[in-house]
Image (cartoon, coloured by chain):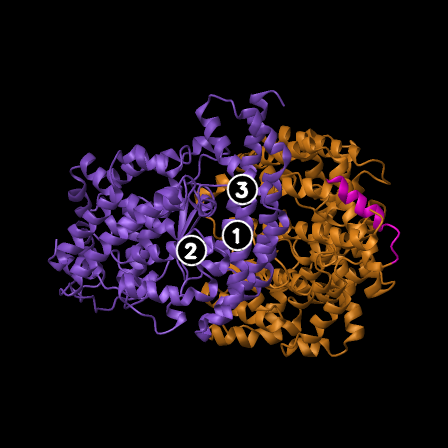
Chain colours: A purple, B orange
Amino acid sequence: MADAAAAWELMRGRVGELEALDEVAQLLEWDQQTMMPAGGASHRGKHLAAISGLQHARVAEPVVGEWLSTLSDSSDPVHQAAVRNLRRLHERAVRVPVNLVQRIAEASNTGFVAWLEAKQSNDFSIFQPALETLLALRKEEVAHLGPADHPYDHLLDVYDPGSTTAELRPMFARLSEALSSFIFEVSDKEGPAPLTASFDVQGQARLSQQILDRIGFRTQDGRLDVAAHPFTVAMGTSDVRLTTRYHPDEILSGLGSTIHEAGHGMYEQGLPVKWASTGLAQAAGMGMHESQSRFWENVIGRSLPFFQWLAPMMNEIWPGQAVSAQALYGAANRVQPSLIRVEADEATYNLHIVIRFELEIALLSGELEVRDLPEAWNAAYQRVLGVHATGAAQGVLQDVHWSNGLFGYFPSYTIGNLYASSFRFEMEADLPEMWTQVAQGQFEDVLAWLRAKVHDQGHSLDAPDIFRQAVGERDPVADLMAHLRGRHGALYGVS
Amino acid sequence: MADAAAAWELMRGRVGELEALDEVAQLLEWDQQTMMPAGGASHRGKHLAAISGLQHARVAEPVVGEWLSTLSDSSDPVHQAAVRNLRRLHERAVRVPVNLVQRIAEASNTGFVAWLEAKQSNDFSIFQPALETLLALRKEEVAHLGPADHPYDHLLDVYDPGSTTAELRPMFARLSEALSSFIFEVSDKEGPAPLTASFDVQGQARLSQQILDRIGFRTQDGRLDVAAHPFTVAMGTSDVRLTTRYHPDEILSGLGSTIHEAGHGMYEQGLPVKWASTGLAQAAGMGMHESQSRFWENVIGRSLPFFQWLAPMMNEIWPGQAVSAQALYGAANRVQPSLIRVEADEATYNLHIVIRFELEIALLSGELEVRDLPEAWNAAYQRVLGVHATGAAQGVLQDVHWSNGLFGYFPSYTIGNLYASSFRFEMEADLPEMWTQVAQGQFEDVLAWLRAKVHDQGHSLDAPDIFRQAVGERDPVADLMAHLRGRHGALYGVS
């Protein structure tokens, strides 16, 4: 295979197939959580296993390695990026034995079942053997993947290619320190009041749709449905499906979900179709994905100008409530250290992640044994957040991730928050009118900025490089703290 | 590969994967017609092409041929049936060049677009070149498939494995003759009145659900949705999805759709799970599938006892209408030669099929040129049904099948009607109480009979053998005529 042009065409064919399989897997997941009848569960595992087996087989084929080496000298930057992206997948698939992949898949199934039971029984010991197996298998996988600066890099690489333990660890430590002292300052102040009013679900659904239409999610190229645990899937840029949830007493949570998922969705809708079937028309990683969802949910969706736009719309749907922008803004930005990550406020949230990140590294490196994990968890929560779980269900068993074998995923959430804060300040410099526009429900310039700096880049660069190209030498830790102090600090009188 | 047990396990793995891919393709189709946003269309073709490309690649692999030859001497009847089923798929995939498969797929896409435009313009000449291409490609495919008693057998084999042109042709000719004279007898008689009342769509949806629950469709293992062109898909026996449609002025058509699709669905729900991943837990072909849908829609769903059960339920939902079982029965069984197949009554329907069957054979054998097809079509309709289309849109362009390259599919519909009639009389002999039960809304024994004689057989035998095993030496043409004369003939006073 000496002809680079031919290799490029063949490689595009294969990458297009892999993209299609990934989109099919996403549809299977979406259907499972929104439309599938109860009886479908027993078959769905077989469908997903067949698709993932084929993904592995097709990316691992020796001919893929031949295309990659033929194209490795190409000076075309699109070729270079495509080779980098596909090589990651190919080498992982080649190096990790199929048998190990299957054992991890089985252990994830078993682990999930054990975790469910353990959580219901509030008893870590039920989950402990499954977690030990899953951790051992991940260590085995990491060993197959060969030397790295840090073994944890091999896990990060799956979700956030380009991020390294060496960079994240000191950054997260600085953030943790700054956050802890900020939360300590806030902790004895009286903050804004929560929202106590009730809002009917039908009205919330109408409002969600109005928000989607205005912020720039293209409804003809997507859907919004209800799911117990909101998520977003994309079967291409013009079939992007969001899910959200509504509860009469938790309107801010439901709206937050809608805006968060729309942030993911607008990223997917904005990926560069010109690069279809190259592997570049993809998100640049989960951290960058979270930066988009959290930018919209937090930076925009919890801002005072946003609520200045939203309050009159709410008062039109629920005239009896007479909500004010200031009350909504306050209620959306209360700070309260708590036990449960997914219910945490914007300020304390990242401490939940830093705790998990350090525990994962300790487990992977062997510094921490699984049997000692609950104690280490509780100690970290006490030390970092000053809270103590009454049982494992509210502590070490609260997240599903580890039960599915997902190690290395949690950092994405805080990477997203860090990126989003720097995007905010860079955007404010580029768009001096942005908050005036937001207060009027005009989001075109904000979206256009994200399109140009992030979405249009696809996966032509890794996320850290896209971030640097967008914001220059900004310090994301300083930006996140400035964002939180300017907002929550002001509300609590400590800025 | 000398070890038959090992070959069997490997073959089951591959067949399981192929079954999963087929189910995934069905979900993609279902989603496309029920849930997919408008923008999704541009991506869906890529998903379906990737799946069908993989289906072809995985079944054509030489190793599949090795498993088949290792197992060809097995005395185990399950092995024998599995080998027969998989060999058909393997040999077709091996013999037909991938390049030709792709050209047929592309020509089907082009053909569909041309057909849509031609139908809208009522102008066959717009579709003619595309149809010529499609026919030429099918002839090329048939040539690759090697000698057969009749080249049309290669087309039948895709949809109705086991059916042959040599058997169908004289059977269809006898049926055509008997039907023509019956319809002639009926034609100058005054028949029952049509239904003129209107029934709201919400009530029809409720009634559809009540019918599904009673006839035996397991709702927890399926769904019922609305689609422009009703269809059924199955992602395994416990995820079977029906679609139907409702129109206030056409309640019998909507209920007929629901019952028809439920017939397909109950077949899928009843396939033998013990044979999962062998290729035997499948329907035995499209003709047998239609026998199930048409048995429920026509034999049961248009019977007087069925309406005796249904009328009180309708009068509970729509007390103002005061429908009677006899009026419903009459309206559901009017005979009227007409131009459009999908709107035809039970008696004239099969003549539409016989016309298409003979035209397809003439086209494939070269006796008829595509350019002469409209004239041949109109002549056949005039001769057989005594009706003449005012334009191509209502004539030769009415069906989508040929535009998608589907030749050899139409006979399935009449095979289904023939099988269903013989099932009726055999079932009446086995279940003397069946019509009494139907009049009381008790369908357990009817469904149990179909389960035992048809569903439980899966694809362990080809459809003609399952049919013979179920009904012995019955003559399905005589049975279909007896069924029609006993029902429509009586209503028209000619029996």
Q: Distance from label 2 to label 3 (Cα)? A: 19 Å
Residue B307 location, x and y as percent? 61, 72
Residue B373 location, x and y as percent? 69, 34
Quarter of the view holding residue A105: bottom right
Q: Are marks 1 and 2 in contact (CB under 8 Å)?
A: no
Q: Which mark is residue A139?
A: 1
Residue A119 falls left or right of residue A334: right
For image coordinates 23% across by 42% down, the residue present is A424
Q: Amino acid at mark 3?
A: Gly
Camera-nearest residue between B208 and B249 = B208
Camera-nearest residue between A217 and A107 = A107
Q: Distance from label 1 to label 3 (Cα)? A: 11 Å
For image coordinates 17% across by 67% down, the residue present is A320
Residue A395 location, x and y as percent? 38, 67
For image coordinates 41% across by 67% down, the residue present is A374
**Chain of the residue on which disc 3 is drawn:** A
Quarter of the view holding residue B371: top right
Say whether disc 2 or disc 3 marks the residue closer to the N-terminus: 3
Q: Distance from label 1 to label 2 (Cα)? A: 12 Å
Camera-nearest residue between A50 and B271 = A50
Q: Which mark is residue A362?
A: 2
Q: Amino acid at mark 1?
A: Lys
In the rendered image, residue B62 lying in the magenta stretch gets the answer: yes
Q: Which mark is residue A146?
A: 3
Asked if residue B184 can be seen in this view, the reply is no
Which residues make up the magenta segment? B61-75
Tag 1 secondary structure: helix
